[in-house]
Amino acid sequence: MFKILNATGGYGKTTIIRDISLEVKAGEIVALLGRNGVGKSTVMRYAAGLIPAMAGHAEIEGIPMPNSPAKRAKMGLGYVPQGRFVFPRMTVIENIAVAAASNGYNPKNTVEELMEDFPILVPKANELAGGLSGGQQQVLALARALATRPKILLLDEPTEGVQPSIIDEMSGVLKRINKENNIAILVAEQDLDFCLSIATRAYVMDKGEVHMEIDRDSLRANKTLQKELLGV
Ligand SMILES: Nc1ncnc2c1ncn2[C@@H]1O[C@H](COP(=O)(O)OP(=O)(O)OP(=O)(O)O)[C@@H](O)[C@H]1O
């Protein structure tokens, strides 16, 4: 349902990712793995339309996506960047409401629904997002992306700096929205255990390229690969 085809991109004149092709099928959770600096975030930015395509393109349900983050969001792409983007001077509720409205959805209903999905945010509902802990901000960033009702959700290192109890809660929510709301997910990560707990398949990157595609069981069993390409 979501594809990146022959993607080459980078920053200025510097090429960082080369000829990347990957696919997330309907109902799938797929991981994008690789050591620090191999280009995972750059692939996610390319997918979100945030960097110009030097070559290749992204498509959703067979339709090529224009190189504009706002247009991609309208077509059903939700993106949570690394470092969790929230508006620090807005309350939790306002953050979710603004995200819903940006894609044409009713802010009040969306806030109510998401508060049910993320009980951890309820006691913080009227607090400024900037005052939340790192883990709570990550959950809010996820809630904001879901407020736009995506068909495909891109998550860039959602576990970075997040405490284990919140990581568990996040993986539970991701599995549930994947199943119940049929949202496909592509998650870039360094946390192999988290990926093995939610994704059924992975692409492993090395030096700006997709080195291999591997299913969960093979990845779990292959300790040499884990060490070589993921450094775990
Ligand atoms: N805005 C930028 N301008 C120039 N170079 C950049 C920029 N962002 C990243 N890079 C470079 O691109 C390369 C890949 O970085 P990227 O963040 O995509 O890797 P990553 O696999 O996501 O790593 P990490 O796990 O550390 O986030 C690195 O060499 C990095 O220095």
Image (cartoon, helix red, strand yellow):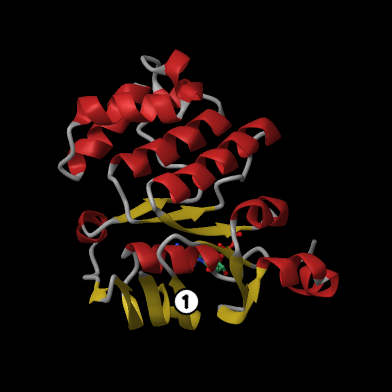
Does residue 43 appear in this view? yes
As drawn, is 136 to the left or to the right of 103? right
Q: Residue at x 55, y 59 (%)?
A: 188
Which residue occupies the foreground of this view, 49 or 58?
A: 58
Q: Residue at x 35, y 38 (%)?
A: 144
Disc 1 Cβ-to-ligand 1 distance below 8 Å: no
Q: How many marks?
A: 1
Q: For this view, does 136 lie left or right of residue 13?
A: right
Residue shown at 67% from the left, 31% from the top:
165
Provide residue 19's location: percent of width, then percent of height. Answer: 46, 86
Left or right for 22, reference 93: right
Callout 1 crowding tier (Cα within 10 Å): few <14, some 14–19, many ≥20 = some
Q: Which residue is mark 1?
A: 22
Q: Quadrant of the C terminus?
A: bottom right
Residue at the right extreme? 224
Residue 83 placement (x, y as % from top left)? 50, 45
Point 24% across, 69% down: residue: 67
Q: Position of residue 163 (x, y in %)?
A: 67, 34
The location of residue 130, given as percent across then percent down, is: 44, 26
Q: Amino acid at mark 1?
A: Leu
Figure check: 178 above or below 40: above
In the picture shown, does residue 4 fall above or below 112? below
Residue 47: image quadrant is bottom left
Q: Nearer the viewer, residue 198 or 84?
A: 198
The kind of secondary structure element at disc 1 is strand
Q: In which quadrant is the N terminus drawn?
A: bottom left
Q: Is residue 35 above or below residue 225?
A: above
Which residue ends up furthest to the front in the rendered image?
180
Residue 90 visible in the current orientation: no
